[in-house]
Amino acid sequence: MPSEIPFIRPTFPGPAELTEDFGEIVQSNWFTNFGPKERQFARALAEYLGPELHVATLANGTLALVAALHATVGYGTQDRYLLMPSFTFIAVPQSAVWLGYRPWFIDIDPDTWQPSVSSARAVLEHSRDRVAGILSANALGVGNPDIGEWETLAAEWDLPLVFDSAAGFGSNYADGTRLGGRGDCEIFSFHATKPFSIGEGGALVSRDPRIIEQTYKFQNFGFGESWGSAGARQCTDLGINAKLQEINAAIGIRQLVGLDDRLTSRRNVLEQYRSALAPLGLRFHVNANASSVWCASICCESTEQQAAVIASLREHRIQPRDYYNPPLHRHPYFVANSEWVGVADLTVTEEICSRIVSLPVHDYMAPDDAERVVAAVQQAVRGG
């Protein structure tokens, strides 16, 4: 019996490299609180992403989202909304709720599967006074081809614009620029499930250095620059502990080495899937070939075909997923609190979620494994 092909297979530095890094951390006697490894990692991230970008590291991607909202829209008043897609990860609305906002779920574009500008505009045209900001997303880590339209919309309606690009570190927009520099800020997750992973970690990226300064202050209990008479730091704003540990930063420094080669290998797997499966009528994510390829998502022609594809993959000992199904507005928490959740017409979201299948992609995925995935999908689609 062949071995199981997991959906995620992280790549990490070896034990010897981590032992060396930990030895340096012990020698420095600096384990967290913006130590030399964290400072080096933040600089390296900014250099990788592009000129005029500033980076704050955080303990994880969810806290990066909270920090991004804190820096752009501030705290909510329980009667204000943030526009966001329902086709994304649960951390997006949870971050809004933690800061006192209500989610208003908007639809996605039928071709790109990205948040729909027209859906957001429809909400703003009748409820602008109830909306405090936009929390958009680069779905599945893929750069949104309509990113410019989102920035135009936010400027037109004078709204802060934050992008959740969690799985998209290393992805490119359609113009070739890397994710990270659009809107007021973007956030990344470096969780072990992501193509660029350090175990747990995240980053907030912005062209505005003031947002980065505020983020570092926020994640360090709101401590300002002022000190008390006895030398104690003084809290000048509400904050939280969201600092990245030195060992995770050390992993990140090593993970940046060879990242582009690993991403190329993932894009090659995606192209292998696309060339074999697109002729069967399966649709792939627009611009995914320029992404970090967290996974390879396909849209089947019907819910019955989706069920058959998932069943065939499991039969062949391959782990599939169906991100993001169910969409967020159908999660029990938001159904139970539907009286304060805004929901636009989500026809496209419902349709795509019912037909999507996410295929596994690994760094330097074994050709035989990719061929097994293709064969299992082909078997289901062809009905044999």
Image (cartoon, rainbow, N blue to C red):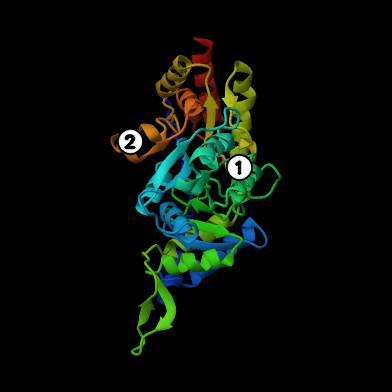
- Residue 237, image quadrant: bottom left
Residue toward you, 280 or 137: 137
Q: Residue at x 68, y 61 (%)?
A: 51
Mark 1 or mark 2: which comes first in sequence? 1
Amino acid type of the residue tagged 1 in the rendering: Gly
| Mark-to-mark CA distance, 1 and 2 | 31 Å
Whole-percent x, y for residue 272 in the image: 62, 29
| Image quadrant where one finds the N terminus | top left
Residue at x 40%, y 42% (from the top left corner)? 90
Q: Residues within 10 Å of mark 2 (few under 14, many from 20)?
A: few
* Label tally: 2
Q: Where residue 58 sits in the image (x, y, percent)? A: 45, 60
Q: Amino acid at mark 2?
A: Ser
Q: Nearer the viewer, residue 108 or 14?
A: 108
Q: Secondary structure at mark 1?
A: loop
Q: In the displayed structure, would residue 344 be above or below residue 351? A: below
Say the numbered circle drawn on residue 338.
Answer: 2
Q: Residue furthest top?
A: 384
Q: Which residue is mark 1?
A: 143
- The picture places residue 265, in percent across and down from the top left corner, at 61, 40
- Disc nearest the viewer among 1 and 2: 2
Q: Is residue 84 left or right of residue 179?
A: left
Tell me, yes or no, if residue 17 can be seen here. no
Disc marking residue 65:
none
Disc 2, SS: helix
